[in-house]
Structure formats: structure tokens, C-alpha cells
Image (cartoon, grey):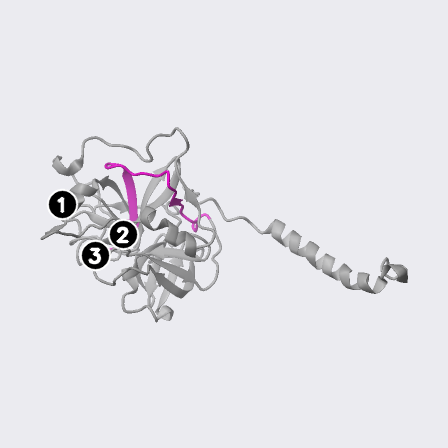
Amino acid sequence: MAISRTPPALGGGCLRILTPLLLLASIATLDAAYTPAPPACGKPQQLNRVVGGEDSADAEWPWVVSIQKNGTHHCAGSLLTSRWVVTAAHCFKGNMNKPLQFSVLLGAWQLGNPGSRSQEVGVAWVQPHPVYSWKEGSRADIALVRLEHPIQFSERILPICLPDSSVHLPPNTDCWIAGWGSVQDGVPLHHPQTLQKLKVPIIDSEICSRLYWQGAGQGAITEDMLCAGYLEGERDACLGDSGGPLMCQVDGTWLLAGIISWGEGCAERNRPGVYISLTAHRSWVQKTVQGVQLRGRSQGSGLAGRRGRAPRALRAPRAVQGRLG
């Protein structure tokens, strides 16, 4: 009614056009105001095998996902946003142009009993790091997986943070890995395939480089790799854990420090797990993944992570503390 009363001198015809546009603008503003912000990264809202680990609790690691190939667990990965997962590039060797073979299962604590609150989403495409060479033990063994559609966050499905430039992980910092991989070489995780977890200390890079030294000036550990685990063996990631997270807690928030990449055998003496560092590839991830969250240490909190005692290289083996798997 207000429009029909507008005097012609004021351009009533124009107002008839502008009013609907203003109404649409108002609706868009309201939609933006009610668009929920993504949940805080690295903060599980807990409900209360890796070799040598133990069962995790339901929703303890809500960013850990199973990358399925033709309906079977193939690799693990970590949720960064509602649309992106990060994993190891080698998980897609020979299958880069076959995204329909893959899907991502989120929120499944037990693969054998994923539950009604889990979500399975197809893969739109995979973006490996441009310098990855598709050779075993190659540097930049990292890939970003674009989901076919955004997932719905819940207490079982949440993103993990990337470490910002303030984060440094000294040797003996205790971190964790999680996955559904084999419990030993050739021994798959038993039904119902409960997500396994294992605490692993960061290993000094010089010690790890010496352990994996190939001779004739050839080092297997590149500048974007870090090592974690136990030099005495017995506890480690294994087949099927590839692409899963190395997670470190800093100031109460879980950060994705690394991606499970490679190792010689599973849980062998002086052959710790090798991980691709997210600190080394943070800028590449940020360029690709819109909305990825970074966290670090607060001012005055000291070194990120817990500094342990003397390096483990010369320490006697410890007893096995259960199984990851």
C-alpha cells in the first residue's frame, strides 16, 4: 500500500522495483546472520590398531576419518573443514583419476559398527602436493581430499587445527596417533574394528636421520619429515594407518602436527614412524582450503608441548603398554 501512494514525482515506478530488491537484501543479511560458524577446531566434545596401542573412546578423536576404497577401509585422514580432508598422497597412487572408487566415512568410532550418526560422503577430487613424486618415502606425501558436499558437524565429527608459526615440537614431546590399521604385519584389526590410539614421543630429527641413513650421502629423512615413536619398537603405526594424524596438544587444543607416511615394517627396532610435517606444508594447505583453522601457543606459555627427559636413543626398551590395533 505504501508503494501505491507514492507520488509520481518521487518515481513510484522505481520504488516498485527497489522495494523487492531491498527485501531480498534484508533476507540475505538475515541468512548471513544465522549461518552457523564452524565449530572450534581441536576440541573434542567427548561422550563419556595401530601396533602397541589401545581402544580409543567414542568421539575422542572426532576429526579422524576412514578413507574407503570400494567400500573397504584403505587409509585414514583428518577433517580440516566441512568440505576438506587431509591425508597421505600415496593412498591414491594409481587411482588419481578414479575418485568414484573412494568415499570418506566420518564419525565412525568402530568401522564394523559405524552407527546412525556417522556420515559417508563421496570424493569430488584429490589434490596431491605438486612436488610429490609417487615414490615410496617421497617428500611432500600429502594430499587434500575435496568432499562431494559439506558434512554436518556433530560431537562425533569436528575439525582439527593446523599448527601456526608459534608451534615448535622439541624431542620427547608426547603426541598421539590414531587409526584402524593392522595390529601387526599381516594381522588386521579385529571386529568391530575400534579406532586405536597410541602415545608417541617426537624423536630428534638428527637421530632419526642417522637411523634411516642410506649411505653414500643419501638420507631418507627430508626437511618436511619428522619422526615419532619408540626406538625399541613394539609400538607403531602399521598398514592401513597411512594418512592418519600425528596429533599434539598445545594449550588445550589438538593440532595436526603430521601425517602418517612411511616406515620400515611395523614397530621394528630403530625404525620409528615417519610423518609429513604440517608446519612444512601449512601455506600450501591454506592456499587450497578456505576456512582451515590455525592455533598455536599463548604468549608466555613456553615451548609448545611437553619437554621430556633425555633423548630416547640410548634408553633401555620399555614394556609394551597395550596394543594399537
Between residues 190 and 129, which one lies in front from this camera angle? 129
Dot 1 or dot 3: first in sequence order is 3
Taking depth in this image into account, of 226 and 31 the one nearest to the observer is: 226
Which amino acid type corresponds to the residue marked 3 in the rendered image?
A: Gly
Which amino acid type is marked by label 2? Ile
Q: Position of residue 128 (x, y in %)?
A: 33, 61
Q: Is residue 188 left or right of residue 293?
A: left
**Residue 196 in the image: x percent, y percent?**
29, 49
Q: Which residue is identified by label 3?
A: 137
Residue 253, percent across and down? Answer: 40, 39
Q: Earlier in the sequence, mark 1 or mark 2?
A: 1
Residue nearest the observer in this picture, 129 or 56: 129
Question: Which residue is at a point 86% across and 57% down the rendered structure image?
Answer: 2
Task: Please state which amino acid type lies under the numbered disc 1.
Answer: Arg
Which residue is pictured at 45% across the width and 55% down the height? 117
Circle 3 SS class = loop
Q: Which mark is residue 260?
A: 2
- Report the disc number at residue 210: 1
In magenta, the rendered stretch is 155-182
